[in-house]
Amino acid sequence: MSKKKLIQKLLLKASVLCFILSVMLAVWYFVSGINILEEKYWQYIDWLTNIEHKVAAIQNKWLIVLVIELLYFILTAFPVFPVSILCVASAMVFDFSQSLFINICGLVILFSVRYSTGKREGGGSAQWLVRRSKTIRTLVEDDGQGNPWVLAVIRLLPLMPINPVSHLYGAMDFPFYRFILISVAGFLPKLISYIIIGNNFANIFSPQFTLPLIILTFISGIFFLLLRGVWNVINKVKER
């Protein structure tokens, strides 16, 4: 299968996955009223909410900013909690625009450190996997460097790994500024969603949690379809 067809197939599957997640979240919206599920859930996330409240309880706002950026730096080596926790913690204290700026700075730190590590030490297990599979290599590599379209899709999809991807693109010597721009732009819809959810993110049984995610996944599905259309147009123009 050619690289063009692989990318088209990936974009289509990503779009379908987003629509499926949107439907699943819509079902969860109605199922979440079951009390016993909510009780079990709160036991599971106690430690996450403790992190949020400890950060938000700091009196000095500049210190909160410093702590959040430091936690982003810690995530480069020890991804023990999701980025969403930091987004929610900042949303408890700062307004939307401030929270967005703080977390974008944190993401730049997170992406940059792992990119630099990959550039210096190689791509590790992720690069080994790419080299082992001709199909994955054809999809991910573009003239010996990382494929920007694949990077955009990975950053936009929920539950995709952050550090291994940054590590891999650094090892493939993908241009740094393009890497940061694409990574931040791709992650931005999730980042905005986390911040808007704010305090309600800790409660997945609230409509304030479910509805933004339904909207996010549905819009992401449409985005992937549009991206696939743009990719087809670009290829047709190149073939002329």
Image (spheres, grey):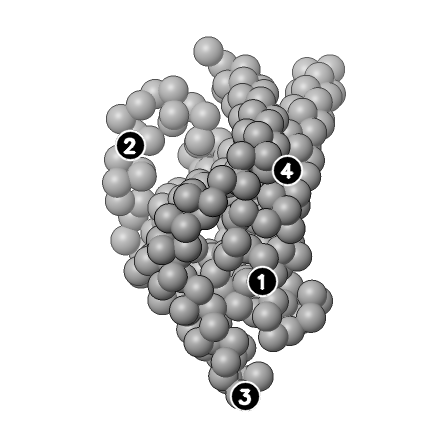
* Position of the C terminus by quadrant: top right
Q: Nearer the viewer, residue 101 or 24?
A: 24
Which one is closest to the eye, mark 4 or mark 2? 4
CA neighbours of label 2 inside 10 A, class few (<14), some (14 to 19), many (20+): few
Q: Position of residue 34 (x, y in %)?
A: 49, 40
Which one is closest to the eye, mark 3 or mark 4? 4
Q: Cα distance, mark 3 to mark 2?
A: 45 Å
Disc 3 secondary structure class? loop
Kindly identify the amino acid type of the residue bearing the numbered disc 4: Ile
Kindly identify the amino acid type of the residue bearing the numbered disc 2: Leu
Determine whether, in the image, residue 118 is placed left or right of residue 208. Answer: left
Q: Earlier in the sequence, mark 4 or mark 2?
A: 2
Which one is closest to the eye, mark 3 or mark 1? 1
Q: Examine the rendered structure and indicate whether residue 227 appears above or below residue 163.
A: above
Which one is closest to the eye, mark 3 or mark 2? 3
Mark 3 sits on what residue? Answer: 60
Kindly identify the amino acid type of the residue bearing the numbered disc 3: Asn
Determine whether, in the image, residue 230 is placed left or right of residue 69. Answer: right
Which one is closest to the eye, mark 1 or mark 2? 1
Q: Cα distance, mark 3 to mark 1?
A: 20 Å
Whether residues under marks 4 and 2 lie with C-beta atoms below 8 angstroms apart, the answer is no
Q: Cα distance, mark 3 to mark 4?
A: 35 Å
In the rendered structure, find residue 214 and report the number of the disc placed on it: 4
Outermost residue, front side: 35
Q: Cα distance, mark 4 to mark 2?
A: 33 Å
CA neighbours of label 3 inside 10 A, class few (<14), some (14 to 19), many (20+): few
Outermost residue, top side: 1
Q: Examine the rendered structure and indicate whether residue 190 appears above or below residue 239.
A: below
Mark 2 sits on what residue? Answer: 129
